Image (cartoon, grey):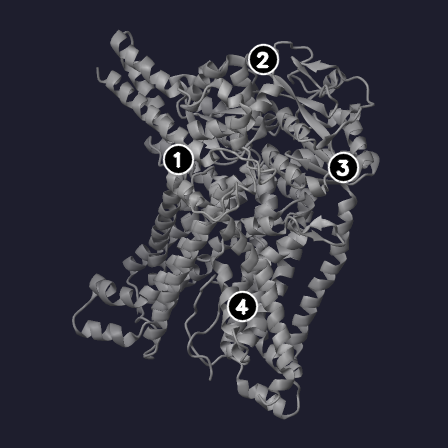
Amino acid sequence: MNSFSRSNWGVSTLAIFISLFLLVFLVVPVGKVIFVAFQDPQTGALTLINFIDFFNTSLFQESFLNSIYVSSMSVLLASIIAIPLSYFTTRFNFGGAVLIQTLGIVPLIMPPFVGAVAMLLLFGENGSVNLLLDEWFGFTIPFMEGLNGVILVESIHYFPFILINLSAALLNIDRAMEESAQNLGASGTRLFRRIVFPLAMPGYVAGASLVFLKVFDDLGTPLLLNINNMLAPQAYLRITSIGISDPMGYVISVILVTFSLFSLWVSFLALKGKDYSTVQKGGGGLMKRDLRTWEKIGCYAVIILILLMVLSPHVGLAMLSFGTVWSYSVLPDAFTLAHYENMFRMAGQYISNTLLYAGLAATIDVILGTAIAYVVWRTGIRGRKWLDFIAMGAVAVPGVVIGIGYLRTFVEYNVPIVDKPLASWWVIIVIALAIRRLPYALRACTAALQQVSVMLEEAAENLGATKSRTVRRVVVPLMTGGILAGFVTSFATASVELSATIMLVNVESDAPLAYGIYEFMQSAAGRGPGAALGIVAVLIVGLATYISHRVIERTEMQRTGTGAVIAEQTPVAIGTTTGAAPL
Amino acid sequence: MRKFNTCLAMAGAVFAVAAIIAPMQSIAADKLVIVTSYPPDTTVTVGKAFTKATGIKVEMLKKKTTAGIKYLQSTAKNNTSDMFWASAPDAFEVLKGDGLLQKYKVKVKGIPEKVGAFPINDPDGYYKGFAASGYGFMWNTRYLKAKKLPVPNSWADLTKAVYNNHVGMSAPSRSGTTHLTVETLLQGMGWEKGWELMKGIAGNFKTVTERSFGVPDGVNSGQFGIGIVIDFFGLSSQASGFPVDFLYPKVTTLVPANIAIVKNAPNPKAAAAFIEYLLSPAGQEVLLDPKIRRLPVNPATYAKAPKGFPNPFKDKSIGSAVKFDLQLSKSRYNVINSLFDVMITYRLGDLRAATKAIQVAEAKQKGNAAAMKLIAEARALIAKLPIKEAKASEKDFNKIFKKKRKKASVKVTGRQAEFEQAWDTEVKANYAKAKALAEKAASM
């Protein structure tokens, strides 16, 4: 670090620039939302009256309880799906493991609200399953009745968070622990209950708290299922039907942020515990054993049943996109390709917008992510940890809150050349996406940077390279894998985002894919093309996910450390290694 | 090194694309910008036909009617929209009242003065009707057949016990057309009777959908059997091949769907061209497209309509029973939204439970006068309203429900949340009492 003073101003400028960006597009809008929540709508004075109104209104009490109920039940149902799957993959030697690993993450590559439409047709009161049940056995099951529907759709969508975290934690358990327990006479369920599960607990809690957070914040699914009395939809409905100055929307936003921070904190605590358990390096997870034939059959049956269930949104959507008329019947009346033709004729713009927005947002993310990682880990600038902290904090800000905050903050700021309020200019959508997905990219970039030895940089500098040249020619090239993984993750998740964009899209020609699907689903003739567009979204995200997996696998192979995979934000995100980074 | 270059190239490519598209998007600001509540099926079809005919590019800003009003109000200072295009005339009345619309005189000939009992154009010349819409209900024929339900004929039919849990509707606060439906019922039947009927039907609701399209969507896919909708939802679903049908009940109104030029529109000439096109024979014919299916306002266009298409200029029974009073509707717009939500949308569970209890008791205790008396009491409790009709139109009272504060000095007593809270408490207690009475009647 001998050339520190010379390069210092460059790095400082960078740090200041990043801080400004985060300040303007994250801290100020969210701060504004919080401020308005505490402001008297008539006089503008600070007050708690809005919160008192909130907790006195039975509708809001109910929404609050419903949101907590739905989130908790989704965690429960997601656990019921994920625990057996992750246990089977880590415990037994059998082919089904590959099936689980590949198909298990498929639910994530579809916006949950799109899945909701398909689920209604399959599991709704007069959906395929219930029509069959009624015909054969004379009863129906209210899968999608009211809050059940939200719980079912959300847990099917988000259970991979638990699956991935829990599998990682199980793989990380010290085999010696299990052996000692067995030597002391524990076996079967007792072994699982007393030894295996507690040791895997941190991974489970991390996944579960993520599911809780995601479900708590999700807007699209309850909206499409016509569930109004939950917090995120109430915030959205208040702002869009009563207006941007209604204080209740802001109060709800504050509550959403508080709960998100809380569940993030829980997951953080859990992950800290996980480091602790891997310090004593014993070795690679539980003892694996082969299955007896009848056990194998049982396992396969469970897995196939679960996978059928979790893949049903995709199956339903595919049928909807190929079906002609699907009304009060088990299957569509006939099949056709016309919806795809229609969709490509009308929706080309949605697709190109999505590629543009998500591409730009992901580019911004990796540039910011690399820069922040560098400032935090390679410089001594004061307050650098805060930069990391604030950027990561974006995870805790629900899309609805970002949307409301941007509307409130930027509606009066006119962009010079375009002559439009910033809040209704398409660039704001890109910025919202970039802020929302920054934590994913930052995580990947940080991990990548930690893998690059400082000695390499010092060597380069000793040989006369300037700081910027070192970064350009040594650091960034060595980080490529991580940066690329970060790019793809941000890209994939940004391309199906709805909750922030639904509030910010102003002109139809600026609308991205997720919004397009939502819009298509608003007319009788648009359901088929909407489903076809949904399939396109699934394909785009699926492809991106596949690429990121390949990239991660390749970089993973070059590494020496065998760390655990933490999927702090999203499973595809993070092939980061904890703890055992070289150096 | 090569990897790094690829990465750079990728980033470069993204930026290059952005650089090309960005200016294109900024040129988009010079297109005709229309704020509309219509789905892409309508906007894209009409927009393409218009562009083909005139060469003028159109940009559609899709908003729910209520959100569209809010949008135009909040961007008025810095207006970038040329036109507002939506169904509900009362929405246009709100905008007109706020001075946000511009007068325009139509040149096209052949459009009559009235459709049903309603003048097609705004008498003051601010907005023009381009299509007529009536309100009624649609039903899924497969659903009714499977559940062995009769086809309903009137609003009152929908309150019958057979339809319990089979009806769907949206909320007026969420959808401008639903607002008109409710207002039509209130004006056609009177304030008390109208709400009583509305709540009677609501007791049979399966769901209150968040979007107005949620209703035809639910009927089309068979989630519920009957939906209260604006006519073109039913007609276009039918035209798309769904096994559904639509009926105008007697108490309904035909109301024009409208278009207007926004005050200080950036492209007033293009906006005028759009109105002229929409009202021309070619533009009117586009409305018959199977994806749109709206009633044209030019009587001559019906010659080209498919068989069985309703023609209000011939069939005088459609929409002549209620003379819709726009001023009355405007005077209580937000209060109606709020009342409906408090009494029905957010208390649907309680309302349904009470209704079900009454229906059970009624079926069981036919002819038992004492029980019937209790049931009548229960019904009265359900129908009870937290405010009187006059209060709903009171100016000062309505101000509370308008969140837009013109000046900090404008004082408003009471907050919306406060009133809704009080109403909710009362409504909830009434429904609970009604349920208890009905259960008592049933056990007599």
Q: Single out the mark in the foreground, 3 or 2.
A: 3
Mark 2 on the same chain as mark 1? no
Subunit bearing disc 1: A
Residue type at mark 1? Asn
Q: Pointer 1: what residue?
A: A130
**Do the residues at discs 3 and 4 belong to one chain?**
no
A364 on left or right of B283: left
Indicate the amino acid at tag 2.
Val
Q: Give the alpha-carbon distance from disc 3 to disc 1, as whole Å.
A: 55 Å
Q: Nearer the viewer, mark 4 or mark 1?
A: 4
Where is residue B92 drawn, in percent x and y?
66, 28
The residue indicated by pointer 2 is B322
Numbered disc 4: what chain?
A
Residue B212 visible to an observer of this rendering: yes
Q: Is residue B252 above or below residue A183?
A: above
The mark that comes first in sequence, 3 or 2, is: 3
Q: What element carries label 3?
A: loop
User: Would residue B57 be found to the left or right of residue A172 on screen?
Assistant: right
The answer to whether tags 4 and 2 share a subunit is: no
- Disc 4: which residue: A442
State the separation of the CA atoms marked 3 and 4.
46 Å
Count residues near mark 1 (Cα–Cα under 10 Å), then give few for <14, some for 14-19, many for 20+: many
